[in-house]
Structure formats: structure tokens, C-alpha cells
Image (cartoon, helix red, strand yellow):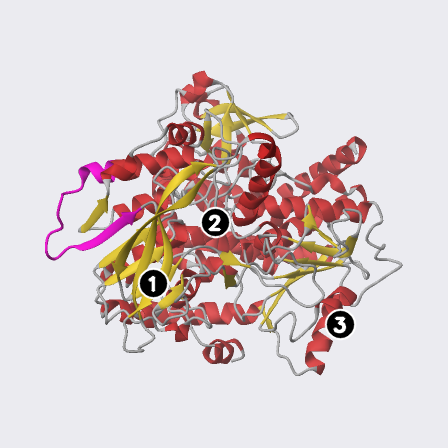
């Protein structure tokens, strides 16, 4: 191990030497570089910055974020028991430490600085601030207490400074219902059902660990509108939740029946096929009854929530969910005659709007028969939603910024030639809230290719004749407004303090979960 | 465009040599003592929570690296312990490289400055190729796969072009298959570069980098949430 450490030191030394050498050569630090601002320091933002630095060897790239901490959902979305997924932070840190790149956190686009100001300050602005809100079901009782969005729950257990106060009540009920069967839903189920001794070795927020240690939740229902052949999760997360020690799994075998349409879906889609196989194996290998001490996970298919019920006596607390049973309909089956083409087009559009219909294009429709499920906690895991800022064209229906390959379209109703010059989008704000971290790699490549093309073709004014103030201008503006931006070196302090605190508790990291504590450490 | 590409490549080549010249001593001395993967992972210091995973990988390679000690295989001087592998990039250009037995294709690509992750736009701007002077070392650190070989992403996806060679590989594990599920442009002979380990039977193998699916958002592909 000593040899290993020694070698690592030597490598670090060599890298720092080469860095020093680089700064001497000075060839890239033009006095009027292309100044780029990336808003949002998550995967989309960092991949964009990385690709910009590589494609434009003179560009200066600033990544800004409303939090004092970088990495977005890698820090506050990826589950604490998935440390290997977070390794990508190393790559992002390298980008942030690049000599032409900076990170500034702790100020918000839209309040500390406006979009139009940013566009004045920089040649190129790339919005990659993701989706910080939730889709709503729009059914009665949705705002009873005890009902949370999965996003809030995830922020809570991951120590997001805006999630600390959620304090979900895990003590007055033994049953939780999770609406949705995607990976976020599976993460939430796993956190609720996993042994806290396992979670204690992760970087889970300590307030969440304490609450989970006292949790009385024994049963979790994962409810989906469609069947096992359409489940939105991936095999990895499913395998994990199925593999939790001493957990009773229940799946109705009748739900596993495959229609010819399902067969088609499974034949053509590897993810769905492997997920279906895992579910089907779990259904047949499970014992018929749980033992008395076992926690339980129930997969419930073909149910859509109809309304939430409160516990009566005006408590305002959720006591159960009323579901309508569903069946799957091929999208075109019930349509007759001449309108087929027009309607199918509409359905196609609707599918893209809601992303509710995956491959196979089958949708869940209510049957008029209902069912009731008692529970004291509901997590809605039905999708994230992006929010607009002032001066940004926004498609409220799709929840994305209208764009062509990342170029933002001006609001003048769909005319593809009307572009917002110098303004781009990437990540969930560009394509909607789906995909894995690596999806952003391709998404960023597309956006950066558009920027490169525009720079090359003079769509973005040449930086030598039209210099912009960039970083200095931004910092000056924030200073004038008494807004304290936090640089990457401040994050490094937070990082090392979190690791030090984690070390004391045999965790990889103890996250600081309030703005106050984060900023205290950041400015020490 | 082809002209600018050419110039960029020349620029990069020159710089590569310059840069190599100054770093060689370091690379050589460290090679014998260390597992392959450790050479380009200074990051363990940054985020020790990932150490466990990197540890296992290093362990795996440590066994392999013992076969390469005693000779400076990095120079290709001992061909008995190297195999020939051709990497085919997105433009169909082929690069033949020598890979020591026991090294993964992800590491081999990295060693030879072949970028597996996504498409490379380095060559777009002719007038800026000189800045490779600054960027070379930095670029070098950027093709390690998002998870650095810990089987938690699909960014090192490669395609074995010949079924015969594909069949010589161990079957992918469930975990590798889980990640391949999420890879862009998956084929029957797709593997993760970090899981394809050089062995004598693979001598002469060709590996293609999948074409980036640039218009993935509109071609009906619906990526799944993380």
C-alpha cells in the first residue's frame, strides 16, 4: 500500500508540474476569449463545460449554481448506497480545476442575476439547471400531509439543504405507497426497506438515518399504471431491491400474463425484457406468505390513483389511496375509419408530451372498477418538472425550453429560424427529465456541436471585435449586490470537512445539510 | 474540414511527443510497481468513498500486472506479453495498439490516447491546435470512463467487430449486462471496455467505438431515469 501511495503522490506531482508548465506556455489565455457561462453544475452542466473546454481551446467557461456545492443530482439525487455512480465527480472536479474553467455557487439565476444580464456578460450562455419541481397528478387530496414527491424525499435523505425540513413522518404508519415504478421509485423503496446498519455505512444524511432507524414502516407498495412488461425501472435497481436481505416480495402472478403486444415489447426492448424476467423470477420464487418479522415489498400493476383519502376528523393527513384498475390499450385499437391518421398523430404527440407511453405504445385506461389501499405515507414518483426563468422561452406543456439541437428557439411561435442568439440548453431543461448520467454526455455533445457551428459560422460575434466582461463582470455585479459567490476552492473545503466528519462516524462523508453550515465551512 | 483535421492531428502529434518526452521517466519508473489502473487514478485522494471499488479493481489488475513485471512492457519490448488490438473510431479510422496481457481495453485506450467516451470535437478548430501544449495532460485524464472502471456506467461501451473474437470472451456478468442495457447503439457483440481484458487468444481483435447517437432525443429512444 505504501508503494501505491507513493506512486499516487508521484503522479500528483507530475500532474502539478505539467500544470505549472502549462501556465507558463500561456498560449491559450487570450485577452478576449470566448466567454461561456453554464448555468447549473450537475452532469449536464459539467459535461457541457468539459466539451466546451475541449472543443474551444481559447474559451473561458464559468459554471454557476444556486447551491454552494457542485455536482447537482450526482450529490443530491444518486442514492447514498451507489457510491460507484458518484465516481464521476472526479471527472467533473478535473473540469472545474481546469485553468480556463471556474465554478461559482451560492447565487441564483433569476434573483441574484437575471438571464438578460448573463447574456450581456457572456458570449454564450448554456442553461443546464435541470428540473427542480414535480409533475402533479391533479387528483383530489393530493396536498394532504403525508404525501410527498419522491424528489423531496430523495433530497431529504441525500442532505440537500432544501430537503432537510421535509421530515416525513415514518413513525405513525406501517405502510408506504410509492406511485411510479421507475428507478427513483425503486431508490425510495430501497431506502425505506433497507437495514439501517447497511445505510449507516453510506453518505446518507444523518437526519434521515436517525428517522429511518426509528421508522415503523414495514410494507411498501410500488404501484404502476401499466404492467411488468412496461415497468420504467432498469435491471440494476430492480435486482438491488429484490436482493435486500430478509425482504418478502409480492407480485401477483396473474399480472405477469403477457399479451401479444407485451411479447412484442419484450422482444424488441432489452431493458424491458430483462426487467420482466427479473420480476417474473421473483414472483415464482417468493414464498406465499411473509414471516412475521419480515418487511414486505409489493409490486402492484395496472392501478392508477384516483384520489387520496384523509384519516377523517379533519386531520388533513393521508390515510389511503383510492385506485382505479386499468387495462392496456394499443394506442390505435379503438379508433375507427378516417380519423386514424390524425388521431394517431395526436396520440404520438401526447406520448411525447407525457412520456407515459414507452415502446409498444400501449396506454393504461381505467376500467371503472376501484380498489382502496390503507397507508400513512405516499411518495409520488411520477416525474420531475423544469421551471422557467424570466426572459426564457418555455414550453409549459412539455416542461422544456423549445430548442433545436440545444439552440434556444425564440418565442415567436415555432418559427425554426428565429433563434435566441448565444443562448443554449442542455440536460433535462432541453429534453425533459429522463435518462441516466451518461445521457447528458451525448446531450452536451449535441449542444456543444451547435455552439461550435455557430461560432464557426459567425452566428456568435467574433470575440476579438466584441469582447465581453465575462467572469470579472459577473463577480463585480454580484459584489455590487452584496451577493457572495462561492468558488470551487470553497467546495473543496466543504468536501474535506464532510469527509473528516464522515470519518468520525465510519461513513465516507457526513453531508452538511444547511446553508448556514455549508457557508460557514466554505468561508473559513 | 479534412484539412483542418489533418493539421490538428499533426499539432497533437507533435505535442504528444513533447509531452511524452518530459514525462517518460515518471511513467517508466512507476510502471513496474503499480497496477495499470492506478497510474491514471490520482482521484482516489479526492473522493475516498470510492476507494473500496477502485481497490477491488486495482486488486484484480495487480494479479495481472505481476505477469508484466521484470520487463518494460510499456515500450512493447516484450511482445510475448502483448497482444495486438485495433481500435476503429467513429470515422472508420483504425489504430493498431499493443496491449499487455491483463490490461482492460478501457485502460489500453486511455494509454494510447483513444477516447472511448463520446465523440471527439478536438479537431474542429485549426487555429487553436497549438493549445494542445496546455491541454494534453488534461485531455489524457478524460477518457477513463465516468465510473473509472467500477461497472457503474456505460461510457466505455465498445463493439467487438468479429463474432469469433466476441465468443472468446467470458460471458458478461449480470452487472455488466445491466450497464450494457443503457449503452447507446448496443449491438450483439457489445461489451464494456473496462471488462474486456487482454489475453493471448484475443491477439488480432478489432474493437469499434459506437457511433454517438447524436439525435437520440428524436429517434424514439427513451432513456430511463437513473
Left or right: where B216 falls relative to A447: left
Left or right: where A284 falls relative to B44: left
Q: Secondary structure at mark 2?
A: loop
Q: Position of residue A135 (x, y in %)?
A: 49, 59
**Rendered residue at 31%/56% (across/down):** A189
Q: CA distance from mark 1 to mark 3?
A: 46 Å
Residue B115 is at least partly visible in this image: no
Which is in the foreground here, disc 2 or disc 1?
1
Q: CA distance from mark 2 to mark 3?
A: 36 Å
Which is in the foreground here, disc 1 or disc 3?
1
Read off the chain for label 2: B
Q: Secondary structure at mark 3?
A: helix
Q: Height in image: A92 above or below A363?
A: below
Read off the chain for label 3: A
Q: Which residue is mark 3?
A: A473
Residue B51 lies within the magenta run: no
Q: Height in image: A399 above or below A506?
A: above
Q: Which residue is mark 1?
A: A378
How many callouts does the rendering have? 3
| Residue nearest the observer in this picture, B23 or A405 | A405
Q: Secondary structure at mark 1?
A: strand
Determine if marks 2 and 1 fall on one subunit. Answer: no
Q: Which residue is mark 2?
A: B41
> Can you say which quadrant of the picture contains the N terminus of chain B?
top right
Tell me whether the residue at label 2 lies in contact with that at label 1, contact meaning CB atoms closer than 8 angstroms. Answer: no
Amino acid at each position: 500500500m505504501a508503494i501505491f501511495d507513493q506512486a499516487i503522490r508521484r503522479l500528483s506531482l507530475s500532474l502539478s508540474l505539467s500544470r505549472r508548465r502549462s501556465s507558463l506556455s500561456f498560449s491559450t489565455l487570450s485577452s478576449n476569449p470566448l466567454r461561456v457561462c453554464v448555468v447549473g453544475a450537475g452532469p449536464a452542466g459539467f459535461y457541457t463545460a468539459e466539451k466546451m473546454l475541449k472543443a474551444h481551446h481559447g474559451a473561458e467557461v464559468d459554471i454557476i449554481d444556486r447551491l454552494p456545492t457542485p455536482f447537482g443530482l450526482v450529490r443530491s439525487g444518486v442514492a447514498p448506497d451507489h457510491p460507484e455512480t458518484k465516481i464521476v465527480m472526479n471527472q467533473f472536479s478535473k473540469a472545474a480545476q481546469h485553468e480556463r474553467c471556474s465554478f461559482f455557487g451560492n447565487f441564483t439565476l433569476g434573483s441574484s442575476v437575471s438571464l438578460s444580464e448573463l447574456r450581456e456578460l457572456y458570449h454564450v450562455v448554456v442553461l443546464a439547471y435541470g428540473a427542480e419541481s414535480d409533475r402533479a397528478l391533479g387528483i383530489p387530496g393530493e396536498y394532504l400531509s403525508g404525501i410527498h414527491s419522491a424528489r423531496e424525499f430523495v433530497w431529504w435523505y441525500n442532505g440537500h439543504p432544501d430537503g432537510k425540513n421535509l421530515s416525513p413522518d415514518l413513525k405513525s404508519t406501517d405502510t408506504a405507497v410509492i406511485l411510479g415504478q421507475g428507478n427513483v421509485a425503486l431508490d425510495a423503496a430501497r431506502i425505506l426497506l433497507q437495514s439501517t446498519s447497511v445505510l449507516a455505512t453510506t453518505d446518507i444524511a444523518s437526519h434521515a438515518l436517525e428517522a429511518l432507524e426509528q421508522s415503523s414502516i414495514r410494507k411498501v407498495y410500488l404501484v404502476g399504471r401499466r404492467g411488468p412488461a412496461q415497468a420504467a425501472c432498469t435491471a440494476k435497481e430492480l435486482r438491488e431491491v429484490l436482493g435486500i436481505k430478509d425482504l418478502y416480495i409480492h407480485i401477483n402472478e396473474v399480472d405477469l400474463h403477457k399479451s401479444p403486444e407485451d411479447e412484442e415489447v419484450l422482444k424488441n426492448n432489452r431493458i424491458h425484457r430483462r426487467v420482466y424476467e427479473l420480476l417474473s423470477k421473483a414472483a415464482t420464487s417468493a414464498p406465499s406468505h411473509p414471516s412475521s418479522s419480515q418487511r414486505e415489498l409489493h409490486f402492484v400493476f395496472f392501478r392508477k390513483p384516483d384520489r387520496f383519502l384523509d384519516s377523517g376528523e379533519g386531520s388533513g393527513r393521508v390515510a389511503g389511496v383510492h385506485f382505479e384498475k386499468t387495462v392496456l390499450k394499443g394506442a390505435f385499437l379503438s379508433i375507427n375509419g378516417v380519423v386514424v391518421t390524425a388521431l394517431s398523430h395526436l396520440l404520438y404527440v401526447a406520448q411525447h408530451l407525457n412520456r407515459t407511453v414507452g415502446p409498444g405504445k400501449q396506454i393504461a385506461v381505467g376500467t371503472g372498477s376501484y380498489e382502496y389501499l390503507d397507508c400513512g405515507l405516499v411518495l409520488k414518483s411520477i416525474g420531475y418538472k423544469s421551471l422557467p426563468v424570466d426572459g426564457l422561452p418555455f414550453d409549459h406543456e412539455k416542461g422544456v425550453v423549445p430548442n433545436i439541437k440545444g439552440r434556444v428557439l425564440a418565442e415567436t411561435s415555432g418559427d425554426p429560424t428565429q433563434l435566441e442568439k448565444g443562448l443554449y440548453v442542455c440536460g433535462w431543461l432541453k429534453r425533459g427529465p429522463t435518462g441516466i448520467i451518461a445521457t447528458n454526455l451525448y446531450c452536451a455533445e449535441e449542444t456543444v456541436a451547435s455552439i461550435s457551428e455557430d461560432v464557426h459560422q459567425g452566428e456568435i460575434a467574433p470575440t476579438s471585435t466584441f469582447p465581453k466582461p465575462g467572469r470579472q463582470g459577473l463577480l463585480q455585479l454580484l459584489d455590487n449586490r452584496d451577493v457572495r459567490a462561492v468558488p470551487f476552492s470553497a467546495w473543496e473545503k466543504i468536501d474535506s470537512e464532510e469527509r473528516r466528519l464522515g470519518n468520525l462516524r465510519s461513513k465516507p462523508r457526513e453531508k452538511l445539510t444547511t446553508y448556514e453550515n455549508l457557508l460557514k465551512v466554505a468561508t473559513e | 474540414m479534412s484539412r483542418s483535421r489533418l493539421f490538428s492531428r499533426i499539432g497533437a502529434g507533435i505535442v504528444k511527443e513533447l509531452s511524452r518526452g518530459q514525462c517518460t521517466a515518471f511513467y517508466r519508473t512507476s510502471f513496474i510497481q503499480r497496477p495499470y489502473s492506478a497510474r491514471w487514478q490520482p482521484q482516489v485522494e479526492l473522493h475516498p468513498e470510492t476507494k473500496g471499488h477502485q481497490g477491488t479493481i486495482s486488486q484484480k489488475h495487480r494479479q495481472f500486472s505481476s505477469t508484466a513485471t521484470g520487463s518494460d512492457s510499456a515500450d512493447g519490448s516484450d511482445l510475448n506479453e502483448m497482444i495486438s488490438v485495433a481500435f476503429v473510431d467513429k470515422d472508420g479510422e483504425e489504430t493498431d495498439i499493443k496491449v499487455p496481457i491483463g490490461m482492460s481495453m478501457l485502460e489500453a485506450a486511455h494509454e494510447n490516447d483513444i477516447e472511448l467516451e463520446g465523440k471527439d470535437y478536438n479537431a474542429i478548430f485549426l487555429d487553436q491546435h497549438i493549445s494542445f501544449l496546455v491541454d494534453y495532460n488534461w485531455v489524457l485524464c478524460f477518457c477513463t470512463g465516468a465510473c473509472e472502471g467500477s461497472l457503474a456506467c456505460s461510457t466505455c461501451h465498445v463493439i467487438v467487430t468479429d463474432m469469433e473474437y466476441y465468443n472468446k470472451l467470458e460471458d458478461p456478468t449480470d452487472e455488466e449486462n445491466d450497464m450494457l442495457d443503457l449503452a447507446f447503439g448496443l449491438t450483439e457483440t457489445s461489451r464494456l471496455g473496462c471488462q474486456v481484458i487482454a489475453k493471448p487468444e484475443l491477439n488480432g481483435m478489432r474493437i469499434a467505438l459506437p457511433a454517438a447517437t447524436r439525435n437520440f432525443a428524436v429517434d424514439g429512444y427513451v432513456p430511463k431515469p437513473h
